[in-house]
Amino acid sequence: MSSPLLAVSGLTKRYRRGGKTIAAVDDVSFDIEPGETLALAGPSGSGKSTIARLLLRLIEPDAGRVEFEGGDFLSLNGAALRAQRARLQMVFQDPLAAFNPRASVARVLDDPLRIHGIASRKERPRRIAALLERVGLSADLAGRAIHEISGGQRQRVAIARAIATKPSLIVLDEAVSALDVSVRRQILQLLLDLQREERIAYLFISHDLGVISAIAHRVVILDAGRTAESGDARAVIDAPQSAIGKALVAAAPKLNRTSKDSDAADRQ
Amino acid sequence: MNPLRRFFRTPEAVAGAIILAALCAMALAAPLFFPGDPQAIAGPALLPPFQDWSLPLGTDRLGRDVLAELFHGARTSLAVGLAAAATALAVGAIVGTVAGFAGGGVDEVLMRITDAFQTVPSFLLALAFVSVVGPSLGVVVAAIALGAWTGPARVARAEVLSIRERDFVAGARVIGMHPLEIAFREVLPNALPPVLALSSVIVAAAILTEAALSFLGLGDPNRVTWGGMIAEGRAVLRTAPFLSIIPGVALVLTVLGVYLAGEGVVETTAVRRSLS
């Protein structure tokens, strides 16, 4: 049996607030197989984003293990951690906040190529153009400032940056939530295409079950930092067992339930 | 609107810019109009202004050309003022960025050092430094910067504390950027605008401190300075007040010009920031 790409077990993060200790993430475990999409769903405050930040070592957990590509990801430090970061990337919710406001598109894409020694200085402009075209953008965009391009273009640049280092896993933290519906569909399609062609696994964090049913193979539903239920995405969404799962399904707009089928068809 | 045009629509800023431009022209043209040593004797001693058109502003106690001294003094004042302010801003920005970005023990140590420098009056600090090391242009610049870097350091730290929590810093960590590069390439440039807003005040204060040091005889003895000219004229204040008044007026105009132009720049960039 092959080992999973990412194995999270007993992940826990506590915060002290006014003398009380609150567990933002409480003993959460899940696996992600190579090339698979696992969705983390749950209402706001359920610990979804905290899990993302824990996995990317932006904050440190109080307990738990994270095995990534067969190694203990939590024990990595310094240069070893920075090197391994090439394999585990992230796309943020707000594409404007996720980039240095002074940066140009070219610089945003140049950084990962330079830091990880992927391409020489002379070769990089060509690689940047290729990355932009890979995510469906014109290579001419390279010279533009981040604040000059549209939100959908920015999120495509964010995806281009994430795939620049050829990662095996990308954490997408509400990556399509800030986009309008038509742009959202295009970005989801782009993610599905990239996954099919490059075998990238996604940890897809969202509160939107319609989007999750369109992209995810499996889903973990969180409630107040704990796993409420998990399983095949379609099965969980069609027949949620937990109270929070039922509440999320009931809260999803009907429009998403009907468009879900065509979105799912796109995936085939 | 174009920030340059907005700048030139503010009358104070224009006045400041004109004064500064005139000063810079003076400083740059000094060796052209007055080649040779401005401290050389050029005519009879204590010639009042507007008597002899070859010496329009008269001469001092030793018969040196006041106008030549004024031109060459502009060089010293501007050079020392700008160099000291640039040093103070650079040191302050770096200390503040390191403190704010590293946090913890590093932050504690750096901020206590900042406190220590801030509690000592900056002029006293400059005075002590120059008396110990000896007066020269570089030492005077360092002495003035020594008392001026704490303000920029505090502003930079406060700004860095808020910037380091933003997503783009997390994004830089995610792509594996080295912490030093994150601090100085991602965070520091974004923390600079409020730090640079201090520059007009710091340049103005540095020019005044330099004048005060020279007045006390702690300036570079090989250079003409306005502070030194005032000190020189002090001995004959009753009989030849113009010797103190002329460099005094030059100082006032310089400080005013720097301040007005600096405020104009801050104002226009502040508007642009709030718009974006």
Image (cartoon, coloured by chain):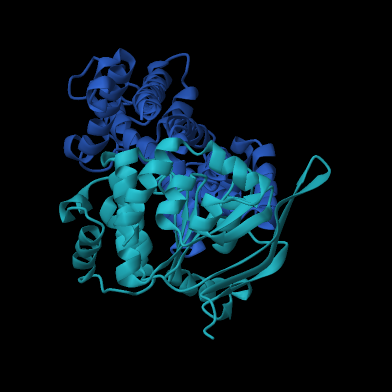
Chain colours: A cyan, B blue
Looking at this view, name the residue that lies furthest to the right.
A19
Q: Position of residue A63 (x, y in %)?
A: 73, 65
In the picture shown, does residue B65 fall above or below A45?
above
Q: Position of residue A66 (x, y in %)?
A: 61, 71
> Residue at 30% across / 15% down in the picture?
B10
Say whether residue A131 is left or right of residue B94.
left
Depth check, front residue: B169 or A230: A230
Front residue (pair A114, B81): A114
Q: Residue at x 53, y 45 (%)?
A: B160
Number of marks drawn: 0
Q: Is residue A92 visible?
A: no
Q: Nearer the viewer, residue A35 or B45?
A: A35
Q: Quadrant of the C terminus of chain B?
A: top left
Q: Position of residue A201 (x, y in %)?
A: 43, 67
Where, quadrant-wise, is the N terminus of chain B in this rendering? top left
Q: Residue pushed farthest bottom?
A: A1
Viewer-closest of B141 and A208 = A208
Q: Residue at x 18, y 66 (%)?
A: A126
> Image check: B105 left or right of B129?
right
- Horizontal and vertical percent for residue A203? 49, 60
Q: Does B179 sit left or right of B66 as displayed?
A: right
Res B116 visible: yes
Q: Quadrant of residue B104?
A: bottom right
